Amino acid sequence: MTSVTNISKIDIDEADILVLSRGLEKTSKLTYDINKSLSKIVQTSDHSTKLFVPILGRNNELTILQKNIESTLNSVASVKDLATEASKYEILLSKGIKEVGIKNYTQLIHRLDDMAESININNKQSAEFNGILVRLTEVIKDSETNLRMYFVAILRTIKPFDPQINMNKKIPFPYYEDQQLGELSSILDYFYNNSDIDAIQESLVNERSETILRSMAFLEPFAKRITTSKNAPYEKGSSGMNPYTEAILGFIANEKSLMDDICSQYMTFKEPILDAILKRLLKTYSKLVNYNLESVKGNLDNTGIFSFELVESVQNVRRSLKFSQNLQNLDSLVQCSSKIDKVTQSLFKDTVQRIGEKVNRLSSLPTDNGVTESTVDTMSRLRKLSEFQSGCITAIATMGRDNWLVASSSPKDFTFNDNFLNNCSEKEIPMRLLSCFFSDCIDTLCLLLEKRAEKILGNSFSSEISNPTLIHSSSKDNFSSPKHKQRIGYFILMNISLVEQIVEKSNLSSILGQEGSSRIKKLHKRYVDYMVADWKDLTAILMDAVFIDSTGKKSKDKEQIKEKFKRFNDGFEALESKTKQYRLTDPALKKRLKSEIVSLIIPMYERFYGRYKDSFKNPRKHIKYTPIELTSAIDQVTR
């Protein structure tokens, strides 16, 4: 039983083992198969991995590409929007400034500029925007060029013109319409705010300067002619420089108004432009002034007086530039003023020296003791000078009397009163200096004529000339006055008469004024005293009489009285005859001479006659004239 039992146990174990072995075999086989499958799977997996890596990479690329496409589509949409907007503005700009309007036109450019600035800030590295940025820049540039061209076109609506025509018709120089001024101002405003002002400023300066200079060219040929011929004396206002200067003043006023109208809000911009425009004009003007001045220097006798118009012209131009110190003190203008001053100031002394030269040519007194050529020449020149009063005042303002008086002149020879220049305001000095100059010329003329007459007549009494009062001494019974004094007095008075006539009929009267008139009266009195000097000596006969009571006369005294009457009668007849030789044509001079003689003779004669008329049994034998008859005789002498 036991063995059977054991055999049974063995069989069961073997069976288990067998089962297990078989299971293991199956398992091993299955494991093998699994491993084999796994190996295949690994191989397949490796192969799949090799296949999927590029696919995944491509997939990633496609994902990125999709994102890029989406971004690009967004960018394209943005570019499209910008391009659409820019295109809209470009189309509007292409219509032109006139159709769009200057303000809208500049606003459109500003919008394009803003778009370009935005691209530069936000999308500078985006290639998609590069094209539109380039296009925007081109459109802006072209539009700004159109603005400049339009600006120049407006400026050129005023063409060069002949200013003389406008001045003759008394019509203003051409000027821009209000709309044009507004457009010019808007364009300047655009470029000023864009900090791109240089080019437009240059255009403005060039265009306005060119228009003005080409307009002034119409007047230039005439401005270079002073007289019609070399030997012709200059006539006031006949030079073409006068209308040339008038036109200059017109353009200065025009340009200042233009700058005020188009760029008044930009002072730092306005002043340099105005200065630049006018500098070209003023330099051309200065060259023309210098050209004329050289011509004057070459012909001072005939054209020297024109320099007083030049000094006034330059002065007026400089006054008109008071809004700009730079222009008012422009070197070329200052130099012109300085050169003209030298010429004009020399003319004052030349005028005085010319008087001496003319008088010294006098070889004999006029047969009728009348007016000399030197007097006519002197007064003609003084009259012409007086026509240039303003220029003369400007030129003489910085001078003194010593600048024109000759060194040999003595103060006592002149009728000048120091108080006239000392007791006045600084503003009055130039006008008073001019009055002094003309009076000094008249004094010089009379003094030199007197000295020349002395030399010609062979009678010198220079010691008496230096004393204007010319006090005459007399001996008891003889005349002591110089032999030709009455003739010289008459000679000078005849010339003074012409002086007075010319003074009264010219600007000299207002220039000389009360002081000048007083100085002529002093001359008048001086030479009237010359004429009546012999009459003064005649009264000395009556003054030397011995006055005694008629009831107690001694024969010796009566003889003296007879002699006094006889000498007076003879002296009166001699002077009567001598005075009648002078043909007095000036009614005022006749009246003055008569008054002087009557005032000298009649009072003394009436006194003498009253005392001694009854001294003789037969008065008419010794007394030729009663006071009334003597007055009548004097009246006949001076008629």
Image: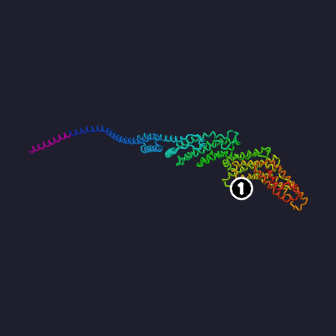
Q: Quadrant of residue 86?
A: top left
Q: Does residue 447 appear in the picture of this structure?
A: no
Q: Amino acid at mark 1?
A: Asn
The reply to whether the magenta stretch includes residue 33 is no
Q: Which residues are magenta?
A: 1-28
Quarter placement of the N terminus: top left
Residue 83 location in percent, x, y?
41, 41
Q: Does residue 261 appear in the picture of this structure?
A: yes
Residue 591 location in percent, x, y?
77, 52
Residue 111 location in percent, x, y?
44, 44
Badge count: 1
Q: Residue furthest right?
A: 555
For the residue pair 297 and 443, the one nearer the viewer reads as 443
Residue underneath mark 1: 419
Crowding near the residue tagged with mark 1, few <14, some 14–19, many ≥20 C-alpha atoms within 10 Å: few
Q: Residue furthest left?
A: 1
